[in-house]
Image (cartoon, rainbow, N blue to C red):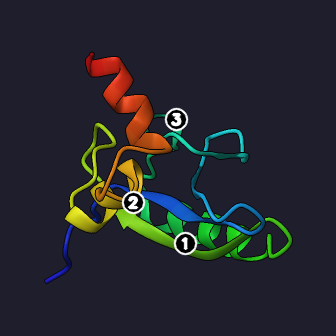
Amino acid sequence: MTRAFTPKVLTANHLLEGDVVYLSASGGWVRDLAQAEVLTNEVDAQIRLIEAEQQVDTVVGVYLADVTAEGQPKHFREDFRATGPSNYAHGKQASTQAELN
């Protein structure tokens, strides 16, 4: 029995800065998960993965990550990567903390 394809986003780390990045529908890399292209077709996802893996001058560690149809992470690892380290507020977490206050 074939499993249904789970929506995915392409994610990687920026080569020079190390930031977590996501592939947008325009083909550029963005740092905000909300701007990532949600891939709902397995063939399209594999093609985009192959294309992204060839961008070795921009990103490293490219892979497909499961998300909901709305683009929310399905695994705690991806949620953690989207918000950054949790030991103190800096980077992405500092931005989030400022929005809450």
Residue 90 drawn at (x, y percent)? 45, 45
Describe the element under mark 1 as helix, strand or loop.
helix
Rendering quarter of residue 4: bottom left
Cα distance between the residues tagged 3 and 2:
15 Å
Between residue 9 and residue 43, name the one nearer to us.
9
How far apart marks 2 and 1 lie (CA) works out to 22 Å
Q: Position of residue 72 (x, y in %)?
A: 28, 44
* Crowd band around label 3 with a 10 angstrom C-alpha radius: few (<14), some (14–19), many (20+): some
Q: Residue drawn 33% across and 55% down?
A: 7
Q: Is residue 93 above or below residue 9?
A: above
Residue located beneath label 2 in the image: 81
Q: Are marks 2 and 1 in contact (CB under 8 Å)?
A: no
* Residue positioned 35% across, 19% down in the render: 99
Quadrant in the rendering for residue 76:
bottom left
Return the residue found at the far right. 57
Residue at image mark 1: 46
Instruction: Residue at 50%, 44% (x, y): give it.
Output: 91
Q: Residue at label 3?
A: 35
Residue 58 visible in the snapshot: yes
- Discs 3/1, front: 3
Q: Toward the viewer: 98 or 66?
A: 98
Which residue is outermost to the bottom? 1
The amino acid beneath tag 3 is Gln
Under mark 2, the amino acid is Arg
Q: Amino acid at mark 1?
A: Gln
Q: Residue at x 28, y 53 (%)?
A: 73
